Amino acid sequence: MADQRHQDTQGNSQEIPQGPGFQDHGSDGVGEKTGRGRKAFGWAWSILACIDERLSTVFSLRQIVYRSQGRVACLNLTPRLQGALAGLAMLAGGWVAYTSASMLLHEQELTAKDTQISDVRVAYRSLLGEVADYQKRFSGVVRNLEQNQSMMLDLAGQNSRLQSNLKSLKSSRQERAQLEEAQTSMATYLRGVENQMQSLAKLNFSLKDDMSSIETDLQDALTQRNTALLQSTQMRRDIRVLENKLVNLENQENVTVERLAEQADLIISNMEQLIESAGLDVEDLMAGDETLVAGQGGPFIELQGDDRTAGRLKVKLQKLENRLAYSESLQAVVQKMPFAMPLNGYYVTSKFGKRRDPVNRKWSMHYGMDFGSSLRAPVYVAAQGKVTFAGWKGSFGKMIEIDHGAGIKTRYAHLSKILVKKGQTVNFGDNIARIGSTGRSTGNHLHYEVLYRDKGLNPMKFIKAGRYVFKK
């Protein structure tokens, strides 16, 4: 490339120096070197020449001219150099785009992982809450069982003490009636004496005019009056003594009645808790017992307070009689509930509720309990009642159904032999059948159901409650 000149600001012409990076590719020295290189590397130079042609079509030769301290220099940007710089720029841009995309994907993965960790933590906390609830329920069941055990142990002793106290209360009633009769007679006699005193006083005033003639009669009247006064004073004392005895007797009977009422309330509470532990409502169960439901009627007469001696005691006695009647009704209902186990020796083969069907292995609902035992083991009735069915019952095989009253029934299925008939009355503990494997069964066992108003209940609740009843 020929030397170039550049004029400065003062109009002087200066020669532009040519350095190693600013040489003209058209000079002779460069041409000679290029010729020798092409001979040595023919095929490589042909490829480079092709690349240079392509680059020259895209990038044209550019020059950058700059001046420093009065000296001018020129920088040549060949198509090859421009292509290299463009390639480096594209590589840098690609690398920046790749790293940015990688960072975004990494952040998205971190966000997804954080979401999964949060879900796992929430599920773990929920699981901990459920475990805590199960522990509380288990603790509540243990406490209820302990309370039922202690209550049933005291039930028999309290009942015997209640009977003895009732006998003593009857005798005290007779004594109180005698004292009231004596008080009434003494009050009547006192009124008669007072009338006599009034008549004597009138007689005394009438005899003042004739003292000499009736002195003897006056002395007799005075003697009678003094005697009557003494008798009246003594009678008043006797009446006060009797009243004090009545008050003391009333206080003793109040204490006895209150103690009996507390014992009756405790017995009622124990029996109500026993019924509730079996999963039944006390009021609903009592209403469903036909033997306890009786019609009542009559006009409404408001109860008036009794201010006489022992009036409050009569009210307390009436309340006590009502509580005792309710206690007897509860005892009658409890005797109809199947708290006993129908087998002597057994092991549970299937519980109440959801289970896998033993034949087709599908999920099904089991409305009873299966107890395994030896073949032809005796089956006992869990409570007194009446046999309403005894025979073959479809997939139950040989089955017995017993109505215990108050809407409670029990069923005994898959029996090998039935020992009772329909309509027969059975008592608690009677041997009614033999265990077997009839009907839809996979082996020797007893299918046991407890129904309340034709709805299946969990028999294990009754059996657990009955353990504390029969333990005493």
Image (cartoon, grey):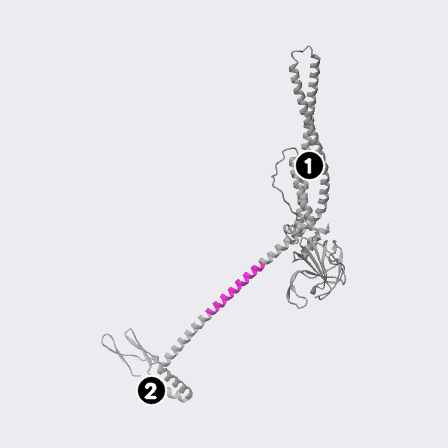
Residue 433 at least partly seen: yes
Vertical comparison of 50 with 384: above or below: below
Check the image and name the residue furthest to the bottom: 39
Vertical comparison of 124 with 298: above or below: below
Residue 143 at least partly seen: no
Mark 2 element type: helix
Q: How many marks?
A: 2
Residue 152 x %, y %: 70, 49
Q: Amino acid at mark 1?
A: Glu
Examine the image and state in which quarter residue 278 appears.
bottom right
Q: Residue at x 70, y 34 (%)?
A: 177
Between the residue at mark 2 and the residue at mark 1, the CA separation in whole angstroms equals: 147 Å
Residue 123 belongs to the span the image colors magenta: yes
Work out whether mark 2 precedes mark 1 in sequence or the reverse, and give the earlier one. 2
Please state which of residues 439 and 44 is positioned toward the viewer in this rendering. 439
Q: Main secondary structure of the magenta part?
A: helix
- Name the quadrant of the N terminus: bottom left
Mark toward the viewer: 2 or 1: 1
- Please give the range of residues in magenta: 103-128
